[in-house]
Image (cartoon, helix red, strand yellow):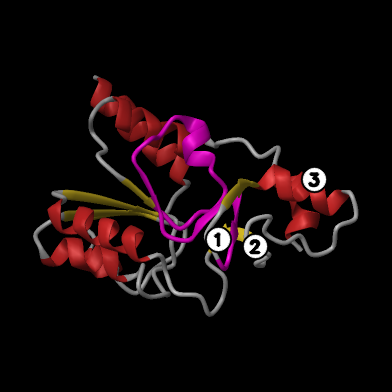
Amino acid sequence: MKKELFNEMKDAKPNKAHMALAELEKMNKLQSLITQNIDGLHQDAGSSNIIELHGTNRKAVCLSCGKMWPIEDIQGLLEKGERDPSCDECSGFIKPATVSFGQSMPEQEMIRAFDCAVRSDLLLMIGSSLQVEPAASIPREAHRTGAKLIYINRTPTPSDNLAGILFQEDAGDVVTEIVNELKK
């Protein structure tokens, strides 16, 4: 399935929200970016302090020894007809470096994410249903420790009542406007 989606995803470009979040980081207004996205578009936009809760589809990993490859290397093997590439060091199975159904969340990233949440004074929650744990707990934990919450989401979430400010609008428009106001 990843082989078939590769060519569609490789040409994806950051949108206005990605670019505005990178600008907030450059302005020293955004200390960390916690994302469930696996596409690497935050990096393409220029963000650098990123915690990828669900991994990245830009790399492949051996499930046995942990060796990593750029996903393009494995895609090349698949396109040459190799149906099941295996690790050149241990012969283990290789998969995209994303969290698959049934896999545990990456421990270090979860620790970093919750640490950022409890140390934050303001948390922007953008584009999540906040339905799936443990990621859904991150804004609640920030709120519990005193952070103000701004939610930018097209649809309601179970914890909208925690948000001090709630936007049900396009994230790119809202975050771009926040950047513009901060520059004034």
Q: Find out whether the residues at labels 1 and 2 contact each other: C-beta distance under 8 Å.
A: yes
Numbered label attached to residue 29:
none
x 36%, y 32%: residue? 177
Q: Amino acid at mark 2?
A: Lys
- Identify the element where label 2 is drawn: strand
Query: As displayed, is residue 110 above or below residue 132?
Result: above
Give whichever of 102, 80 is nearer the camera: 80
Residue 75 horizontal/vertical position (percent): 76, 49
Residue 154 horizontal/vertical position (percent): 47, 57
Give whichever of 20, 155 is nearer the camera: 20
Q: Residue furthest right?
A: 81
Q: CA distance from mark 1 to mark 3?
A: 19 Å
x 70%, y 41%: residue? 10
Give whichever of 85, 51 is nearer the camera: 85
Q: CA distance from mark 2 to mark 3?
A: 14 Å
Residue 132 horizontal/vertical position (percent): 42, 74
Dot 2 alpha-carbon crowd within 10 angstroms: few under 14, some 14 to 19, many 20 or more: many
Extent of the magenta region: 35-64
Q: Quadrant of the C terminus?
A: top left
x 61%, y 47%: residue? 69
Is 49 in the magenta?
A: yes
Numbered label attached to residue 98:
1
Q: Which residue is mark 2?
A: 95
Numbered label attached to residue 76:
3
Q: Nearer the viewer, mark 1 or mark 2?
A: 2
Q: CA distance from mark 1 to mark 2?
A: 8 Å
Dot 3 alpha-carbon crowd within 10 angstroms: few under 14, some 14 to 19, many 20 or more: few
Q: Find out whether the residues at labels 1 and 3 contact each other: C-beta distance under 8 Å.
A: no
- Identify the element where label 1 is drawn: strand
